[in-house]
Image: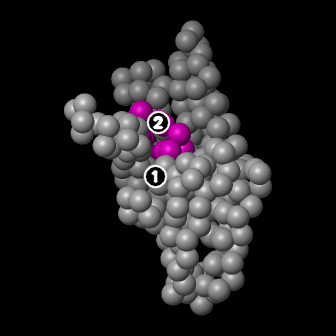
Amino acid sequence: MKKIGGVIISHGQVANELVAAAETVVGELKHIAAVSIGWHDDVETAKNEVARAIKKVSEGNGVLLLTDMFGGTPTNISAMFLEHNDVEIITGVNLPMVIKIASQNKEMTLSEMAQAVESQGKQSIYRASELLMPQKLKKDA
Amino acid sequence: MLKGNVTIINRLGLHARAAAQLVRLASGFQSKIKLIRTDNAVIADAKSILSVLTLAASKGVELEIEIEGEDERSAFEAVQEIFKNGFGEL
């Protein structure tokens, strides 16, 4: 089975740590790479690093770029790769999104995977007290 | 279909790594494996870690296991066993 590759791209070390956390949970992830862009890194250098990471994780079915924040440098650099149609970008990466890419158990197209990861990321945000203490919330509103 | 109840006995509950263990085990079987919280009826697919985590099952929570498929007997035993072992954290 060919997996969709994943590259997590962030300011600072967030990307590395997200991948490390996902690996602690689900095991080694050969199809996911992290690119941490330093606050003062040169754009060309950063772009080359993203290009290398895409090449490394690609299995031929496309690569999903997960960036930390829309409008930030990691997203803007990622956008330079959009002209290749085997790349999609999802912004606002969180750990459940990385785990979603990690645990692919059936072959999906890049666009299907992008949709799944986007909705997973959105669904995974909870106000925990609503889930864990529903009675208390009703009382206090 | 086989059904049975288990209780979470390890201190940390069904946290990320424990859930990952359960998912790895469950994914080794053909059968459909569902986990249902007995107190609020939240249902999870035992083969999806992100689904299992939404159970938010802490220590003491009771879950109903529902397994259906050709290998349901061995899956049922294996899943019950991993809960009884407290995911190796006892």
Q: Which residues are magenta?
A: A87-98
Where is residue A88? Give x, y as percent. Answer: 43, 45
Most extreme residue toward the bottom is: B70
Q: Can residue A21 be seen at all in this image of the molecule? A: yes
Do marks 2 and 1 share a subunit?
no
Q: Secondary structure at mark 1?
A: loop
Q: Which mark is residue A93?
A: 2
Report x, y in % for residue B48: 53, 61
What whole-number distance in Å separates the C-alpha atoms at marks 2 and 1? Answer: 19 Å
At a point 59% along the width and 67% down the height, the residue shown is B6
Residue holding disc 1:
B54
Residue type highlighted by circle 1: Thr
Q: Is residue A137 left or right of residue A19?
A: left
The residue under label 2 is which amino acid type? Val
Q: Which mark is residue A64?
A: none
Of residues A112 and B19, the one drawn nearer to the viewer in this rendering: B19
How many tags in the picture?
2
Determine the residue positioned at 59% across, 30% down: A15
Q: Quadrant of residue B25?
A: bottom right
Subunit of mark 2?
Answer: A
Q: Locate residue A105: give its quadrant.
A: bottom right
* Residue depicted at 63% across the width and 78% down the height: B76
> Residue, x 40% and y 38% (percent of image)?
A128
Whole-percent x and y of residue A71? 36, 23
Other residues around mark 1 within 10 Å, as few (<14) / some (14–19) / many (≥20): some
Magenta-colored stretch includes residue B79: no
SS under mark 2: loop
